[in-house]
Structures are given as structure tokens and as C-alpha cells.
Image (spheres, helix red, strand yellow):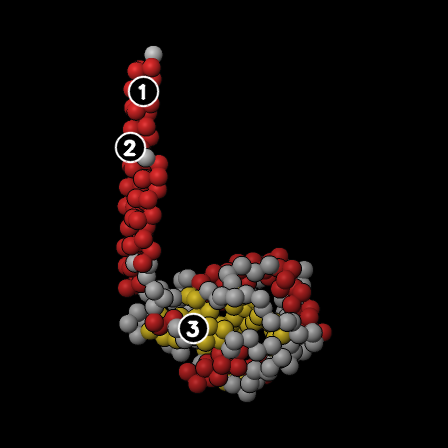
Amino acid sequence: MTRAVTIAILVALGPAAAAAPARPPVLRDVGLDEHVGDKIPLDLAFTDAAGRRIQLRQLFDGKPVVLVLAYMRCKMLCSLVLHATTEAVRGMKLALGRDYRLVTVSIDPGDDAATLAVRRDTLLARAGHAGEPEHWTFLVGAERPIHALADALGFHYTYDPATEQFAHPAVVFVLEPDGTIARYLQGVQLDPRELADAIRDAAAGRLASRSIAETVLSCFHFDPSGRAHREAIRRYLQIGGAAIVLMLVASITTLVVWERRRGRTS
């Protein structure tokens, strides 16, 4: 009976595995190519949260720069990366503004200065630097400078008009004072010690080796895929329930047969 149950479970799992949703096509172009040692173009112009027009070179004033590409409407991985950055800032002995600079560039040209300011102030308060807007610069620009910066960083993202959302990797960049890319910190968790080491290395001109991460988390909400995942989850729950029922039936049947045999021998 146990063998029969096992076979039944394996047969049931077969169609479910085949029905697992494929990666949405919009994510095919999302990824990260590490360009450690390359310099980003510092002549790119953006607008900060105060509405001022500035070039990136104005932010590289002798200190390493911790850079995050995100967009303000994002409530998923990019928000987690920004929050992880604030926690790392709180956990480091390095002083924000003195030892390094924080910069966030929006990949959404539709973001405006007011939205940037609200997000900046919220994150600064979380990082323990409330009322210090000069310590975290938030920028937005036109598509051309955004793409130019992203391409220089190897940050591949895409926009899906159907859902009006961006798909992008989850990563924090650490750059040397002259704009040289020193290290990539991937994922939604940021170890304060690792970030501090990266900042110190960037200040000293030491480049990191290529990240060993094999996959890049992509921030994207895809409704059709979500429905597919819900269907897959429902199917797995149904299979799990059926498997439990089969195992209970097998156990009861085994007990009944055993009791009958015991009665015959007694």
C-alpha cells in the first residue's frame, strides 16, 4: 500500500511540475553585468529633490559614493534595498557625509522632486539622520541620462507598459571618489560590515573581484504571472491534500488488515 501511495503521489506531481509558470518574457532583458574598474560618466545631468539641476561630478567630491538605482513607486525589492541601506547606515561606524556619500537615482523619468523629497526624508529618519537632507541625494532625470548611467553600471532594466512597472535588479553600487565602480553588493540584505569594508576599499582605490552571485533578484510585479503562480499554488495544495488523504487511507487500511490478521491468529 505504501508503494502504491508513493506512485500515486509521483504521478500527481508530474502535471503540476510541468504546469509551473515560466519566467515572464519582460524579465528576459533584466540582469546585471559587473563593470568593476570602469568609470561612470560624470557629465550626466539630473534634477535633485530640491529641483536643482546638477551633474554627477558635483557629487564626487573626494568621498566614496554608495549608489542605488530605484524608483519611488516601487513597493517591492527596490524598497527593500533602500531600507536595507538605511539599516546598514545605522549599523556602520563610518559617518554618513564625512566618510561617504549616499546617492539614489530614480530609473523612472516620471518621478518628480516632491516625491523624491518625501522618500528621502523618510529614509533619512529611518537611518538616524532626520533633518539632514544634504546627506542623501535623490536624483531624477530624462530617459537618456538614466539609461546612460544604468548602462555604465551594467544595470539592465525594462519597463512594462501593461503593468506600468519597471523590472530591475536588486543591487547597491559602491564607487570610488573619481566615479570608478569598486564593488557590487547584490540582494535585499546588506551587511553593515561588508558595506563598510567596500567603502574603505573604494576610498583606498582597491577594487573588488567579481561577485560570486549567480542570480540577480528582479523587482517586478507581473499580474498574469501572479495568476499563474496562484494556480500553481492551488494545484500543489490540492495535490498535498490528496496525498495526505491517500496516506491516511493507506494507514487505516494497513491497521485494519493487521487487526484482522491478529484476530485470526489469536
Whether residue 264 is visible here, answered yes or no, is: yes
The residue sitting at the right extreme is: 204
Describe the element under mark 2 as helix, strand or loop: helix
Residue kind at label 3, given as amino acid type: Val
Comparing 245 with 39, the one in front is 245
* Marks 2 and 3, how far apart at CA: 48 Å
Residue found at x 28% / y 50%: 235
Q: Is residue 98 above or below residue 257?
A: below
Comparing 157 with 203, the one in front is 157
Disc 2 residue crowd, few under 14, some 14–19, many 20+, Cα 10 Å: some
Give the number of the mark in front: 2 or 3.
Answer: 2
Q: Which mark is residue 30?
A: 3
Q: Is residue 186 left or right of residue 222?
A: right
Quadrant including the C terminus: top left
Residue found at x 63% / y 62%: 194
Whether residue 229 is visible here, answered yes or no, is: no
Quadrant including the N terminus: top left
Question: On the image, numbered disc 1 is attached to which residue?
Answer: 261
Disc 3 residue crowd, few under 14, some 14–19, many 20+, Cα 10 Å: many
Describe the element under mark 3 as helix, strand or loop: loop
Residue kind at label 1, given as amino acid type: Arg
Q: Is residue 249 above or below residue 28?
A: above
Question: On the image, numbered disc 2 is attached to which residue?
Answer: 249
Q: Residue 18 falls in which quadrant of the image?
A: bottom left
N-terminal of the pair, mark 3 or mark 1, is 3
Residue found at x 67% / y 65%: 197
Residue kind at label 2, given as amino acid type: Val
Q: Position of residue 163 (x, y in %)?
A: 30, 69
Comparing 224 with 256, the one in front is 256
Q: Which mark is residue 105?
A: none
Q: Is residue 46 above or below residue 263?
A: below
